[in-house]
Structure formats: structure tokens, C-alpha cells
Image (cartoon, rainbow, N blue to C red):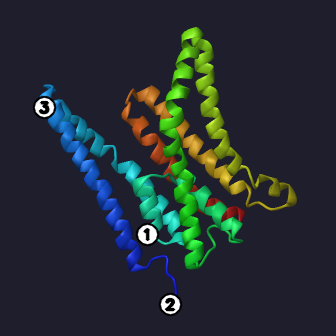
Amino acid sequence: MTFSTNAPILFVIVGIIILVVFLQSVYFLVKALRRAKEIGMDMGKMKKTMRTAAIFSIMPAVAIVISVMTLSKDLGLALPWLRLSVIGSLSYETIAASNAESAMGLVFGTVESLTAQQYVTIALVMTIGIMVGIWLAPILCKRILNGMVRIEDRDKKWGDLLQASLFIGMISAFLGYVFSDFGTVFKGETTGLIPVLVMLVSAIVMMIAGVLVKVTKWRGISDYALPVSLIVGMASAIPLTMWLG
């Protein structure tokens, strides 16, 4: 029997998991509304908040759909649908999947079919890798937070500097992936420029959004800035790839 990344049984399993997560969300939403009534919160404001949150979830959802389509070329639809519906992001999932494929001698984005063993290996790398953060959060986060609070209490300037450094360190990890193939440019290959230029396009879109927020004073733009920059960046990869080969 030939393995398929889009086998019906995979969609059944994924559908059950996502249904459980969805029901959990509904359960806690109902609990929150009941608690809000108990403590006398304005239900008009609650409904307005829920309506606003629903509206501003549309654009990020579009970015997620595009992310699923990006990963589906190699992994089929079921696994990306599960990963990006429950916990995960395009940046992490792509890096995890491409690293797993690379270890097996495959090139991300060019895989026509996977064996069951390769599929399970990639799924385990994507799943276990991101779960490390969940396991470490209850163990380390409180200690880290207390340490940062103590530093801020002693010297707020150094506390702000530490937070900025941690954020830059996180961004640097992703930048390393973007520039990992840039050295090939010096050998006459242009493919290493594509992720760099895609990043620059996304950055420019984000800067334009920042300017619009300052000029128009409409804070809602900031809610759409990230998904829009993500979509435009991914869309720009198509003409850039055609141009640079």
C-alpha cells in the first residue's frame, strides 16, 4: 500500500484533534462570559470586544491559510493544517520541516512524495521541537520573570536593555536562517538572495504600516501590519524567484 500525505485517515485524526481544541475554546469562552456576568462587567463592552476580536482575526487567518498552502507542497494538507491550527507558526514549522528533510537528504519545496517513515520523522521533529517551550515554561518562566523584575527594580535602564537584548537574540536566530545561504552569491548563485529580499520586502511593508499609524492615528493598522507584511513578503517570493532563478 502506497503512503499518501493526503490520506483520508490523516484528515480524520487531524479533524478530531482540532475539534477537541475548538471545544476547549468554546468551553472557556462560556466560562469567561458567565464569570463576567457574576462580577458585573458591562456586557455591551464584552460583546463589542468579542466582535472586534473576531474581525481582527480575519487577516491573520488568511496568512495562516497561505502558510498551510506553502507547507502542503511537501507535507500534504493534513499535517500543516494541524500544526498551524493548534500551536505553531510558519517560520518555525518551515525551519523544522526543512531541517528534518535536509537530514534525510531531501530539499524542502522540491519533494514530490514522502514515505511513511519520512513523514512520521518530520512530524515528530515539528511537534516535539515546539513542545519544548511548553514544557520549559512552567519550570523556567517564573524564575526568569522574577530575575528580570529584580534587575528592573535595581536599575530600570538595565532592565529595558536586557529585554531588548533577549528580543534581538530571538530575532537573530531567524536572521541566521535567512542569511544561511547568502554566501552562495559570491559563487555566482543568486538563490541565496531570495530569502533576504523577501525579508526586506516584508520589512518595508511593516515600516509603511508604522508610518501610517503615526500619520492617520488609526491604531487598527498595527493589528493588520504583521499578517499583511507576511502575505506581501510571501507573494514577492514568486517574482523574485522567477527573476533570480
* Residue projecting furthest to the right: 187
Real-space Cα distance between discs 1 and 2? 19 Å
Q: Earlier in the sequence, mark 1 or mark 2?
A: 2
- Residue 33 is situated, as x and y percent measured from the top left of the image, at 17, 37
Classify 56 as above or below 191: above
- Observer-nearest residue: 125 or 41? 125
Instruction: Report which residue position mark 2 lands on.
Output: 1
- Residue 87 is situated, as x and y percent measured from the top left of the image, at 44, 52
- Residue lying at 13% horizontally and 29% vertically, measured from the top left: 38
Quick one: label 2, few (<14), some, or many (20+) residues within 10 Å?
few
Classify 207 as above or below 200: above
Quick one: label 3, few (<14), some, or many (20+) residues within 10 Å?
few
Classify 226 as above or below 233: above
Instruction: Report which residue position mark 1 lands on.
Output: 78
- Residue 64 is situated, as x and y percent measured from the top left of the image, at 43, 55
Badge 3 amino acid:
Lys
Q: Secondary structure at mark 3?
A: helix
Badge 1 amino acid:
Ala
Classify 97 as above or below 139: below
Instruction: Report which residue position mark 3 lands on.
Output: 37
- Residue lying at 68% horizontally and 56% vertically, measured from the top left: 194
- Residue 235 in view of the camera: no
